[in-house]
Image (cartoon, coloured by chain):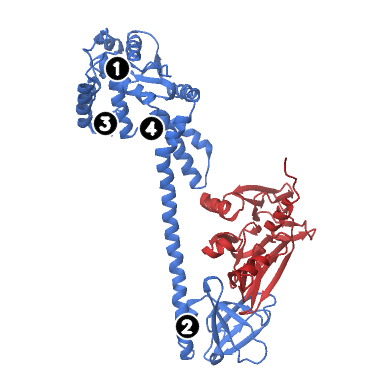
Chain colours: A blue, B red
Amino acid sequence: MTDATLPYFKAVWFTPDGSGGGRAARVTLTPEGLSIDAGEGYRVDWPLRGLKFGKAGEEEAYLLITCPIVPGPVGALTLTDQAFARILATRVPLVDQPLLARFAEENQGHVRRKWRNLFLASLLTAAAFGGGYWALNHWVSDWAAKKLPLETEKKWGDLLIRSQLVGKTEITQGPSYEAAQAILRRLRTGAPKDLPYTFTLHVVKDPMVNAFALPGGHMVLMTGLMKEASSAEEVAGVLAHEMSHVTQRHVVKRLVQSLGWRLWFSLFFGSGDLGQVAFGMGSLMEISYGRGQEEEADREGAKVMAKAGLPVTALGTFFDKLSKKDGTDKVPAFLSTHPASKSRSEAMKKLAEELKPQAPRPLALDWAEVKASLRP
Amino acid sequence: MSAKFEIIHPGDSPALKVDLPQGESVYAEGGAMVSMTPAIKVEGSMRGGLLGALSRKIFRGETFFYQTLTAASGDGQVLLAPAPPGEIILLEMDGSLSYLVQKGSFLMASRTVTLQSKMQNLTKGLFSGEGFFISEVTGQGTLALNSFGAVHRVDLAANEEYVVDNSHLVAWTSTTSYKIQKSSSGWISSLTSGEMLVCRFKGPGTVYIQTRNPSAFGGWVSAYIPTKG
């Protein structure tokens, strides 16, 4: 007898021979037993004392109930509801109670396993994501930088320099331009002979104390930096450092990392918008080098300086001066902040001792005059 | 008005005709669209993001992208067909039963039907012929599956058992369980019978079987491909 006021549990009903497959059913727990509404006008009541229990389905996730004492062919019910199993356990004969209680518990185990699997899946996802990022930073960028043809790198550089100079005034003549080119000429004499790069130095009218390198050998020197430097050698120190970022292919590695990171991120989260990734190329200015790369650029830059007959410590001096003036938290991008200022300056002094440069040949430039030409 | 589904040209080269009222959509295996009225908009989507798509592609051998077919600018009609020759079946899901579907058998589902990867245990992954990952389909709506060859439906009563050769499975209800076993009692006779390993199902529930085995067919065809030299 079905009591409409009693709560029902969702179940699947199977006919005695299984024909037609399972179909949705409602089971109500009545004082006498189970009242089953199997749909299509079929209703049946099973007394508590006649119920027989088993398990069914993948991972035994279903409670299987039949009632063999009912005359004629008997169907079967499957349920997954733990609450149903717990209530039923309080009513059925002692022998079946542990089975039902265990089902409720195990089913809770299924839920626990589900959460555990979800947790593991999240962990794996995070690991895959982090692993991908790590691989990008370590292997992929190195590999790509090695594989990237120089011609392509130069093309990227040509493309990027144009975007970097938009809206800026490039100085192409006068004392500051001449001085900058003279510094570059001297630095070229210190660079390895077989270097595949021909550096191009762009002097840009900008009060920012900054200089940066682009792939392929374009370098940008801002007039703000020239005004801040006490000597042409200090500017040479900065440029030697930037040149080394190019020769050591840091620029292209960072670019690959930046692009790859965006690509990886967008792929991972299902919005592989390549347009946005390409847009990332424009944000090259945001790229900062790693600690190792900065140290390498310092070291290689120092070698270039020494070989070109310029004072190795000039970059350190300039860096110290800027740090004192602005505080280390406001160090320009070309110096980056990774190696601590003091240790860096000291490292450069050590380098100067190691390299044992010949007596420097100062640049034949009247730096005061160069600076004067930059005044508005 | 809701979507209408009809299997046309029944036999070994059927297609599924889907009539969609405006605004309704279904999703289908990538590349399943055969033809459609202009009101239908087709979009590729990676359901479940990259991870979901990857697991589908790598583990279940399905396509990376699903296609979502939406009746965008009015009522529309679309014809869908699977890659292999074989039957298409429609399953109406009322939410009470969920299905486990072997890789490559999914053709189309209503938006309200959910497909997710389910990992099988080691034995089943290695020997069932269905791989480690199968699809678990839950929810309410219409599900269209395709087979290699014809589909044979077997309804099992509670505790009734039935044996199916591996690689002949299409789908089965989650109330059914199966285990892998040798086809005969001894390994030698299992081997010589040409069946080796089989899946032993236990009811209650329904098992859908395909009458042809894709890998056996591949082996049969390869014997007729002339080799060079």
Same chain for labels 1 and 4? Say yes or no: yes
- Tell me the amino acid under the disc marked 4: Ile
Identify the mark nearer the N-term, 1 or 4.
Answer: 1
Residue placed under numbered mark 4 in the picture: A287
Q: Are marks 1 and 2 in contact (CB under 8 Å)?
A: no
Query: Could you give the CA–CA distance between mark 2 and mark 4, rounded to whole angstroms?
Result: 63 Å
Question: Which quarter of the rendered picture does the N terminus of chain A lie within?
Answer: bottom right
Bin the neighbour count of mark 3 within 10 Å (Cα to Cα): few under 14, some 14-19, many 20 and up.
few
Residue placed under numbered mark 3 in the picture: A330
Residue placed under numbered mark 2 in the picture: A99
Identify the mark nearer the N-term, 1 or 2.
Answer: 2
Q: Assign a secondary structure to mark 2.
A: helix
**Could you say where residue B166 lies in the image, as x and y percent from the top left?**
64, 64
Q: Is residue A50 above or below residue B63?
A: below
Chain letter of the residue beneath label 1 in the structure image: A
Figure quadrant of residue B120:
bottom right
Q: Is residue A345 left or right of residue B97?
A: left
Identify the mark nearer the N-term, 2 or 4.
Answer: 2
Residue extending furthest toward the front: B188
Bin the neighbour count of mark 1 within 10 Å (Cα to Cα): few under 14, some 14-19, many 20 and up.
many
Query: Could you give the CA–CA distance between mark 1 and mark 4, rounded to whole angstroms?
Result: 22 Å
Same chain for labels 3 and 2? Say yes or no: yes
**Could you say where residue A269 lies in the image, as x and y percent from the top left?**
49, 47
Residue placed under numbered mark 1 in the picture: A236
| Residue at figure coordinates x 63%, y 68% from the top left | B188
Q: Nearer the viewer, residue A241 or B215?
A: B215
Q: Nearer the viewer, mark 1 or mark 2?
A: 2
Bin the neighbour count of mark 4 within 10 Å (Cα to Cα): few under 14, some 14-19, many 20 and up.
some
- Tell me the amino acid under the disc marked 3: Lys
Q: Assign a secondary structure to mark 4.
A: loop
Query: Could you give the CA–CA distance between mark 3 and mark 2, rounded to whole angstroms?
Result: 70 Å
